Amino acid sequence: MHLPFSSASDVTWKWDPTRSAYLRSYAGVPDKLVDGSQTAAANLVILTVPTSYGPWLENSEGAHEVEVTATGSGPLVVLRNGIAITGTWTRPDLTGPTALVASDGTPITLQPGNTWEELAPQGTAVTVAAAPPPPATTVPTTTPVKTRPTSTTAP
């Protein structure tokens, strides 16, 4: 999944079937945690949300902080088990949970494990590509071995 927040924050998540997790990168560089491992999540929930610029300066270049409207509803993509599910999120107020509903109207469940939520500003292109296939599993095969009879007496 590719989410180009800006030229300075170009986020990519890739499915790793061997770990059963999505791995996060910035501009192609693995996003590392303090312990040196790459940021990973069992589930990704990408909510498209309204945003605006707040009054606070975010950096020395004069950019203003982005504010997010975390209530209402909008499009979503949920990634789990290497698949993408599209639908709609709804959250009437800040005191309740967000409902995740698939395009067919069924609730979207998440895999056990950690979940990462990305808040994509309206108008940001969220690109989801097919996950790589799971690693091939090989089943050991046995070949019958022919043996010669042995005798217990010397020739």
Image (spheres, grey):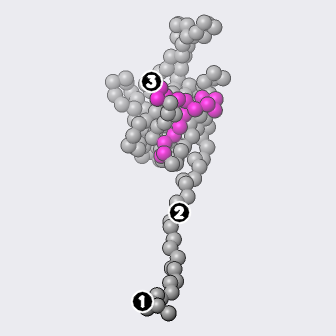
Q: Residue at x 66, y 23 (%)?
A: 7
Q: Which mark is residue 70?
A: 3
Dot 3 and dot 1 residues touching (CB under 8 Å): no
Label 2 vs 3, first from the N-terminus: 3
- Tell me which residue sits at (53%, 44%) in the image: 16
Q: CA distance from mark 3 to mark 1?
A: 85 Å
Q: Secondary structure at mark 3?
A: loop
Asked which quadrant contains residue 114, the reply is: top left
| Label ID, residue 138 | 2
Disc 1 secondary structure class: loop
Instruction: Write down the residue under mark 1.
Output: 152
Give the mark count.
Answer: 3
Q: Which residues are magenta?
A: 19-35
Q: Is residue 120 visible?
A: yes
Q: Looking at the rendering, which quadrant does residue 24 occupy?
A: top right
Looking at the image, tell me whether mark 1 or mark 2 is earlier in sequence order.
Answer: 2
Q: Marks 1/2: CA distance?
A: 41 Å
Report crowding for label 3: few under 14, some 14 to 19, many 20 or more residues within 10 A (C-alpha).
some
Q: Amino acid at mark 1?
A: Thr
Label 2 element class: loop
Q: Nearer the viewer, mark 2 or mark 3?
A: 2
Residue at the image position 48 percent from the left and 36 percent from the top: 40
58 or 92, which is in the foreground? 58
**21 in relation to 61, above or below:** below
